[in-house]
Image (spheres, rainbow, N blue to C red):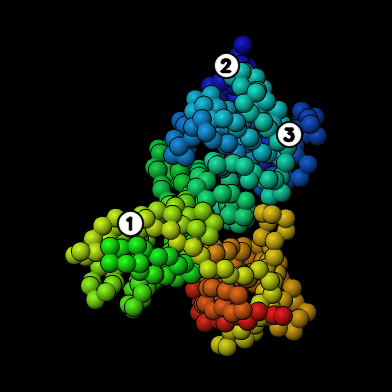
Amino acid sequence: MSKLRNLITGTTRVPLFRGCLAALFVATCAISGLADAVMPDRPLDVPYEPTHPKVVEAMLKLGKAGPNDIHYDLGCGDGRVVIMGVKKFHVKHGYGIDINKQRLREAKERAEAYDVTDKVTFLNADIFNSDFSKANLITAYLLDHINLKIRPILFSQLRPGTRVVTHEFHMSDWRPDKIDRHPLARGERISLWIIPAPVGGEWEWSTSLKSGAVNASMKLTQEFQDIAGTVQFQGSAATAIRDPKVEGKSISFTTRGVVSGKAVAVKFQGTANGDTITGTQVWSGGDLSGTYPWKARRKAANVLGRWRIDIPQKNIFNGVLNIRKEGPLKLVASFFGKDGNMEIRVHDVYLWGTSVYFRLPLSYFDYVLFKGELNNDGGAGKAYGMKVKEDYKEGIYDPPTVTWNSAWTATRVR
C-alpha cells in the first residue's frame, strides 16, 4: 500500500541538485548490485529530476491539453506528465519517451496504479531518433543545449499549431509565445511555443470590390513565428505590413495602400494551409469599405538543392550549401568549404517557405548564423558571426554576442 501511495502522490523520488544526481544514482546502484538493471544503455543527456505535480498540472494547462490531443513527453522519467494528461485532462493518448529503463518501469507501475494503461504508451527510445509527428502537444523538462538540439526536429516533424511546453529551459532565439510564472517550477518559469505555419514567400490574390476586381500581392520573410513584408495593390506602390502575427496556422496583419486613387487601410486575417491562405480582409476607405473574402496563393518556389554561398567581406566562409529531405519529414543540410574538401553537417536548419535560417558551427562556442531567402535560382541575406557566452547563469538566457555581420548571396548550382 505504501508503494501505491507513493506512486500516486509523486513522492517516490526526492528532487536532488541536478548536477549531483547522476553520480549519486550510479553510486547507489553499484552498492546495491543493481547498476546493470537500472542504468540506461548510454549516459543520460539529462539527469532525472521529478517535476512537482502542481507544476505538471500548470504545464498541461498552459499547453491547453484536452480530449483531442495526442501528447508526447520527451524524457518522460516516471511518466507523471503523460499520466496526469490522460487522467485529469482527458488527453486522447499519451506517449512517454525515455532511454532510462528503470524510469520506464516506474512509469508503467504508475500507469497501472492510475488504471490508465490503455491510454498511455511508454517507449524506450532516444528522443533524437524518434518519430513524434502525430503529436499536437509536446512537453519536456530537458536542458538548454538539449532543447536547442531538439528544436529543428520539432520544426521538421510537427504540424503548424502544435503546442510545445517546457519546464524552465529556453529555446535560444525562438521566442516563447507565452511564459507562465510558477513558484514551484525550476526558475519559476514554464514556457509555451506554438509551431508556426511556414508563410515566407510571394503570394497573390484578387479582391472583388463593387467597382471591380483588384489584384494584389505580398512578399513575406519569416524567422520562427516572426514575419515581415510588404503588400502591393494593383496600380499602387508596395507598403509595409503592420502588426504582423503568426500563431500556428493563424496569420494576421494590417496595411495601407491606394486603390483607384483612394487611400485604404486593410486588416487581413486568415488560416495558412500549405500554399494557400483563406480568410477575410476588412477594408476601410470611403465607398471601398467592407469585408471581403481573402484567398491568397503562394507562387511556386524551389528551395531544396545545392546553393553556392558568397560572402564578399568574409570569403573564408564561402562554400556550397546542400539542402535536402530524408523521407517525408527530416530536413538535412551540409555545407562544403570553398575548396570542396571541408564538409560540415548543418544540424540547425529551417525553411519557412522561401525563408531560410541555418547555423554553421565553427567550435563549441562559435558559429556563423545565416538568415535570408532562397527562391528558385538565387537568394540573399545576412550572415552573423556569433560567440556564445561561456559563463551564463543557469536558467537565464544570455543571447550570444554578434562579432561581425555581412551580406551573402546564393546561386543555385546546376
**Amino acid marked by disc 3:** Lys
Q: Position of residue 241 (x, y in %)?
A: 35, 67
SS class, disc 2: helix
Instruction: Indicate which label's residue lies in the foreground, 2 or 1.
Output: 1
Q: Where is residue 65 in the image (x, y as percent from the top left)?
A: 49, 35
Q: How many marks?
A: 3
Q: Where is residue 45 in the image (x, y as percent from the top left)?
A: 67, 47
The image shows residue 228, relative to residue 45, as above or below, that is: below
Name the residue carrying label 3. Answer: 101
SS class, disc 3: helix
Please report the residue visible at 61 percent of the width from the left and 22 percent of the height from the top.
116
Name the residue carrying label 1. Answer: 292
- In the image shown, does 124 or 218 lie closer to the viewer? 218
Residue 5: mark: 2
The image shows residue 156, relative to residue 54, as above or below, that is: below
The image shows residue 335, relative to residue 59, as above or below, that is: below
**Amino acid marked by disc 2:** Arg
Classify residue 265 as left or right of residue 214: left
> Residue reaching furthest left?
286
Q: Is any part of residue 155 visible from this angle?
A: yes
Could you tell me how far apart the alpha carbons at marks 2 and 1 are, in whole angstroms? 60 Å
